[in-house]
């Protein structure tokens, strides 16, 4: 399995495409500050999922996955700025926000799954230590 197989990475990739498409259209394209920020934040989601997946230590994985989740909150927040200040992009911002929420939920599931595996390994290690021969 590779990070490209992860559902959350696939959804993050869709989100990045939507963000870039939105950034190139409407009167929003002229605001380099907001477009640059939302582009970087969306790419951060995708990149941190990939980087976390490739880490071998569970705590490092969780750190990157949590950054990805935080970046999804940033993208979601920025869609409100766009919706409120760029009327021609408002409908698209809502669609991007919906994709961001979907992506964030799946990242949260990945975090929970990773934490569950970590706690399961800790219990297994403890049980094995009980039966270790000294």
Image: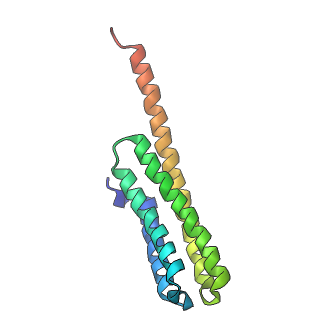
The correct choice, above or below, for 98 with respect to 60 in the image is below
Q: Nearer the viewer, residue 113 or 25?
A: 25
The correct choice, above or below, for 126 with respect to 40 in the image is above
The correct choice, above or below, for 94 with respect to 41 in the image is below
Q: Which residue lies furthest to the top in this view?
A: 134
Q: Which residue lies furthest to the right in this view?
A: 84
**Quadrant where the C terminus is found in the figure:** top left
Residue 96 occupies quadrant: bottom right
The correct choice, above or below, for 78 with respect to 54 in the image is below
Residue 60 in view: yes
Instruction: Please tell me which residue is depicted at 52% across the width and 46% down the height of the picture.
Output: 112
How many tags in the picture?
0
Model colouring: rainbow
Q: Position of residue 5 (x, y in %)?
A: 36, 59
Left or right of residue 110, residue 54 in this image:
left
Q: Position of residue 64 (x, y in %)?
A: 44, 52
Q: Which of 73 and 114 is in front in this view?
A: 73
Residue 6 in view: no
Instruction: Please tell me which residue is depicted at 61% across the width and 69% down the height of the picture.
Output: 77
Q: Position of residue 124 (x, y in %)?
A: 43, 26
Instruction: Please tell me which residue is depicted at 55% across the width and 87% down the height of the picture.
Output: 28
Instruction: Please tell me which residue is depicted at 45% across the width and 29% down the height of the picture.
Output: 122
């Amino acid at each position: 399995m590779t990070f490209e197989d992860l559902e959350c990475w696939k959804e993050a990739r869709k989100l990045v495409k939507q963000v870039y498409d939105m950034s190139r259209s409407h009167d929003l394209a002229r605001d380099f500050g907001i477009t640059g920020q939302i582009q970087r934040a969306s790419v951060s989601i995708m990149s941190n999922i990939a980087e976390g997946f490739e880490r071998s230590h569970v705590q490092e994985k969780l750190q990157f996955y949590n950054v990805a989740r935080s970046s999804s909150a940033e993208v979601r927040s920025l869609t409100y700025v766009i919706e409120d200040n760029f009327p021609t992009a408002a409908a698209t911002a809502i669609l991007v926000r919906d994709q961001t929420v979907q992506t964030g939920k799946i990242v949260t599931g990945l975090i929970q799954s990773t934490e569950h595996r970590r706690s399961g390994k800790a219990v297994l290690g403890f049980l094995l230590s009980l039966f270790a021969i000294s």
